[in-house]
Amino acid sequence: MGDASSPTTATDLLSASVQQSANKKQGLGRSPLGLAGTTMQEHEIRCPSSDGDHLQTAAGSHHRLMQPPESPTKYLPLLAQQQQDHQPVSKSNISAMMSVPQSTLQDIPRAVMFSPSNAMETPDPKKPEKGATLVWRDLTVTLNGGKRGEAPTKLLKSATGFARPGSVLSIMGPACSGKKTLLKALADQLPKNAKLYGEVLLNGFRQRLPYGTYAYIRPDEELIESLTVRELLYYSALSQLPSGLPLSKKLSRVDASISEMDLEDLVSVRIGCSHETGGLSQVERKRLSLAVHMLSCPYLLFLEEPTYGLDSVGSVLVIATLRKLAWTRRCTIVTTMQQATSHAWPLLDQLCLLSLGVTVYFGPSRGALDHFANSGFPCPRLQNPTDYFLGVIDPNLDNINSDEESGDQTWSQIESSVALRTLEATFQASSDFGLVQSLVVQLCENEGPILESAGHAGLLMCMSVLTWRSCVSMGRDFGYYWLRLLLSTVLTLCIGTMFYNLGHSFNSIRERAAAIFVTVAFLGFLSIAGFPAIVKEVKVVSQEIANRRSTAISSKFVFGNLLASIPFLLVLALVCSSISYFLIGLHPSFSHFMYFMIDVFMCFAIMDGLMMFIATTLPKVFEGIITTLCIQILMLLVAGYFRLGDELPKPVWTYPVSYLSFYTYAIQGLLENEYTGVTFPSNIPSAPAISPQVTLQTTFQVPKARIGKWENILILAGMAIGYRVLTSISLILFQALTLHKHTTSRTSSRPSQDE
């Protein structure tokens, strides 16, 4: 990674960019899926290893990848139909039968897309495979019942298989087939109430997946919509790559991921919420998620439904990208898939078919057609193979009749349970099953290197990156603070004009208190406008915790977010305080104005902390907003305005609710700040002026023990930090509930008979 060819300075980066543009003009540039450079030796991939960071050149056995495609988009559409009809793949025929625009499906190297992998080849015991070989044998997963005495449910039954470097294993099956359970079992992501039996070996050893050696990608990956593509990758690289890695190499990884995922034209585009609003499309978001996870150069890549929410063209591009990653990076890819379109079917490499937790087929995807035909269920000539497979093994489709006019053999009269037993028995009696068992034994005995973590980002670096990322997100997201600023400005103008220039009459004693209470209370209510943006950011952090891309990220994010919010909250407090304070005509001293602003700032900080804590426990926006409103109303009821402190019932409302309400301390501090040093005339002409102590203790019943206004500020500051601590604890509990929650690690024991 430190060779001279790697651009490490701005001049080198500019020269490399100019050279790449020149290569593109000569027809020698990268392919649309990211194979950059004019020769394979120039396409260097960074991969972590146990002895440090090194370069692995995707040359040698993969020199065929750089053979230029003969014609754009000739290898994808309707290829499945021609293979089902046992016709040779004719480039001219496929080009003539295109059903999608040629600009959408770009040049894809044929060797990468349609060449069979070496997954079924016999391993050489003298030459251990480079990368990560994942083997599972007699894998059974049970889920404990929710009630005492309830028998556990078997989600997966005696599954056996393997995944090797350079291959893509697609786990396919109908709903409740166990495909997601198998993926989570292999990725060590099972929940607490699930028990795993059998063996899961990584390079011949039982070991946990170290940090940075694998990536787990969910179908609904959250991305920070206000960031650009390059910014997201840059911040991700700084927060997850080891601290010992030079900055120039981290930037090189970002550039490599951008090129590999074909994101060069999108580096300055904000992610956004949808393509219609100027953001990224679904396919581009999928590629960006892959790019973020590939920054650490994982050996293993687990994906849940990578084609979820995509059309047929997008599914083809995503699967083609996975095939390219497996070939060029020599990584092991395991993915679940509901089904594949007819265009994507030829791109599938290895296939594992499951139904009701039972393995129906395991092997090359093209061999599944022969397996179903040998079992008495031949696939019709013009039907999508995956649709047909799922129709046979899905119990929910027992009553679906096939086309009686097609002369093909029908399976509608056969129950799925019978078909499932037939397919299972045929597979176990086939030579494919014997080959799988033989390869599993050989791969278990062929021990490879033990994978080790390359390290984590430093505390200071991670804290700085998360703080700056939050600051950028807050500044660009209109709903985070700018909407609150706009609404709060309008509100304080309304309050200021309504209570304009109250003066110092006897009636102004109550009016001042009303103006202070309304200002603080309604500004707190308007803070809820930022709750949706907080929910999005909390979801991103929760996802990062679940993916283990950063360690102890919860506390770093919480306090980094607090530091990032301080400038915005200060501006918000300054604007609102200036408008309301001087329009109402409160205490003329500048020091009293500064206290008013600090008090409002503390209320804003507490509200942010409270909303962040609620967002970690109630991630749904509507539920979170309603809960926040109810909590605020409860706090306002005991704040000492609607009912004075001595009039509140002692149990519950006084102790502890009034002491837990931040409005109690905020309003008491503002009342003391306003009435200290100011006398008001009595409503009786001959009576003396009303002193501040009488106003506070008699009129508003502020206890002597709690009339120190700066003491109230300290309590508010403690509550602001306290809510952040609660948020951090909530995220840590989420991490404990999400990661490594199964109490039984990977064992070789078998479940008992009652299970």
Image (spheres, rainbow, N blue to C red):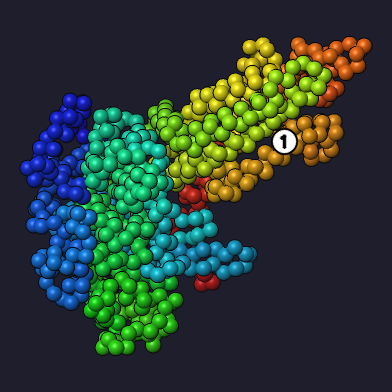
The residue sitting at the left extreme is: 26
Image quadrant holding the N terminus, namely top left
For label 1, the SS is helix
Q: Where is residue 594 in the image (x, y as percent from the top left)?
A: 62, 16
Residue occupying the point 43% across, 72% down: 356
Q: Can residue 194 be seen in this view?
A: yes
Specify the amino acid type for callout 1. Leu
Using residue 677 as the reference point, say whether residue 79 is left or right of it: left
Kindly identify the residue that appears in the image at 39 percent across and 54 percent down: 219
Query: Is residue 640 shown left or right of residue 487?
Result: right
Q: Residues within 10 Å of mark 1 (few under 14, many from 20)?
A: many
Give coordinates of residue 324: x percent, y percent: 21, 53
How many numbered circles does the render carry?
1
Query: At which x and y percent is residue 102?
Result: 18, 57
| 720 relative position to 291: left or right | right
Q: Which of 205 and 229 is in front in this view?
A: 229
- Identify the image quadrant of residue 93: bottom left
Residue 231 picture location, percent across and down? 34, 35
Question: Circle 1 sits on which residue?
Answer: 636
Mark yes or no: residue 204 visible.
no
Q: Is residue 385 above or below residue 129?
A: below
**Residue under the image location 11 percent in, 50 percent down:** 66
- Residue 655, relative to residue 386: is it above or below? above
**Residue drawn where x is 32% and y is 60% of the image:** 311
